[in-house]
Amino acid sequence: MANAPGAPATPSVSSLAFGAHLEAHLDADVLVLGGGPAGTWAAIAAATAGARTILADKGFCGTSGATAASGTTLWYVDPDPAKRAAAKAAREGLGGHLADHGWMDRVLDRTHAAVGQLADWGYPFPRDADGRDRRVSVQGPEYMRLMRRRVKQAGVTILDHCPALELLVDDGGAVAGAAGVRRQKGGRWAVRAKAVVIATGGCAFLSKALGCNVLTGDGLLMAAEAGADLSGMEFSNAYAIAPAFGSVTKTLLYQWASFTRADGAVIPGAASKGGRSVIARVLATEPVYARLDRAEPELWAAMRQAQPNFFLPFDRAGIDPFTQRFPVTLRLEGTVRGTGGLRLVDETCATAVPGLFAAGDAASREPICGGFTGGGSHNAAWAMSSGHWAGQGAADHARALGNGARNLRRAGGAGLREGKGASIDAAALTRAVQAEVFPYHINYFRTEEGLTGALARLDRLWSNAAGAAPSPADGSLRAREAAAMLATARWMYRSALARTESRGMHRRLDHAALDPAQRHLLTVGGLDEVHVSARPAPLHPDPSGATRELAA
């Protein structure tokens, strides 16, 4: 892969500039980065296909990430044509008419099969009154414990607490492994691999949303440094309701909430669905309070059973959320609850870079969601499905590649490469990025003026980060996290500036209407210079089975 003009040459994999600190140097057919649902499904699929597979997780595979911390619904629909058609139609308008029905069908089929596998593996689905499994949701702790067990049974080598810092590429630019740090044992690791699956999740900008503080866009940055591009990054301004004193961002139960001002006056239009922007406007100037007073007492026990972790912050604070008011806030979940991520180029979940695949929240969910997800359901189904396909695709790529020798080089940039400036101050850079992405008046209520101003400041931050000296070994992870959040914010806002309309979760105050002429997808990429281009949205079927252009 060619170096950027003026950049120093990257060392070969034989040296990797790690010296004596390189304690783990491994080889594999497939390397999976990330140990959440998408990563575990990918590792199982790759190993089942006969590939020597390694999974490296930033935390402990099975306990880290958004899913492991809570329950999630599933986009699980019986293979009945009418039910499937209704499930797809329910998302059309909400997602801005950008979803692909072919991908939706594939995901519905694969999710149905994957949930069946979970049942066969012993996942304890609850039973209905007729004794049948209720397969529309999973509890994260049980789900991920099972997935870790299945990964190990498949013969996958798991590297826990081993976050990747950068990808390795060969002279032709194909991805050929990754390198990172060992958080607990110390030192560095590197894995030569014939294919890599990015399943590192999305980016929530360290907003303290439940399970999301390991999700800082690391995989997006690494992939972009290797030449991958992204899609749907304008659909990444998702804010979730949470108690002001807690991190739980499960919003389902807020459909039973009343929202009031400090003096007890009801806030007209404030709601979990369709009224979150009202809450944001009030929060900009004063506190907002909620109470689940619309839930009848006979529902209380069932609600606690369905989402037990929702109630933990209240129980710890001695608050009864059904009868007492409590302050709420909106926490940014960015691309985790949004739809933006790495652009996939085919049904194997390959990216535009040879040897690099993406799955789960690290990949754009536009194929099934368009411009809006809203939470677990579709993302959980996408993780199961895209993880499976990415693992299979990576194994097939590795098999076709064979065993020829390759000269490998490091692809990492900001925080890792030699530069003239001081090393990245990760804490300061993180605060600076958060100051641009957290405020509602910049990110939620978007305008050309607000986006342009934020981008000018973010671009200056990137110029400094890209030219920084390498971070010390014990600070390299935090520096890379900060750089990844910075890169993600710039992709988000460049895309948001290019879409001069309101569609899906992307809202422009200065372009409040949906523009039928902008029913397209936006590809974004680049680091020093970010570029955005439009590509056609998928055709949509009509009842006769033909395809047609959809006038949104």
Image (cartoon, grey):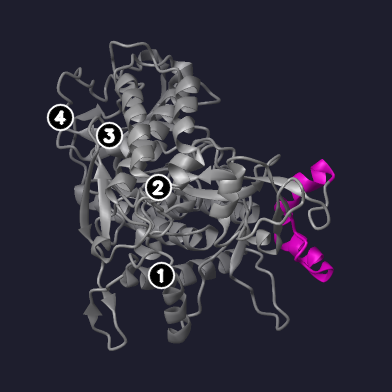
Q: Determine if residue 349 is in view.
A: yes
The boundaries of the magenta stretch are: 291-318
Dot 3 crowding, Cα within 10 Å, few <14, some 14–19, many 20+: many
Left or right: where 512 falls relative to 352: right
Q: Name the residue under label 2.
A: 362
Q: Of label 1 and label 3, which has the lower sequence position?
A: 1
CA separation, marks 3 and 4? Answer: 11 Å
Left or right: where 532 falls relative to 298: left
User: What amino acid is at disc 4?
Assistant: Ala
Using the image as rendered, state which of residue 422 and residue 240 is in the foreground: 240
Label 4's element?
A: loop
Q: Of label 4 and label 2, which has the lower sequence position?
A: 4
Q: Does the magenta stretch include residue 186?
A: no
- The answer to whether the residues at label 3 and label 2 have Cβ atoms under 8 Å apart is no
The label number, if any, that marks residue 2 in the structure image: 4
The label number, if any, that marks residue 231 in the structure image: none
CA separation, marks 1 and 4? Answer: 43 Å
Residue furthest out toward the bottom: 544
Answer with the quarter of the image where residue 453 lies.
top left
Q: Residue at x 42, y 34 (%)?
A: 485
Where residue 343 sits: x, y (%)? 29, 51
User: What amino acid is at disc 2?
Assistant: Ala
User: What amino acid is at disc 3?
Assistant: Glu
Q: Residue at x 60, y 51 (%)?
A: 279
User: What amino acid is at disc 1?
Assistant: Gly
Q: Name the residue under label 1.
A: 93
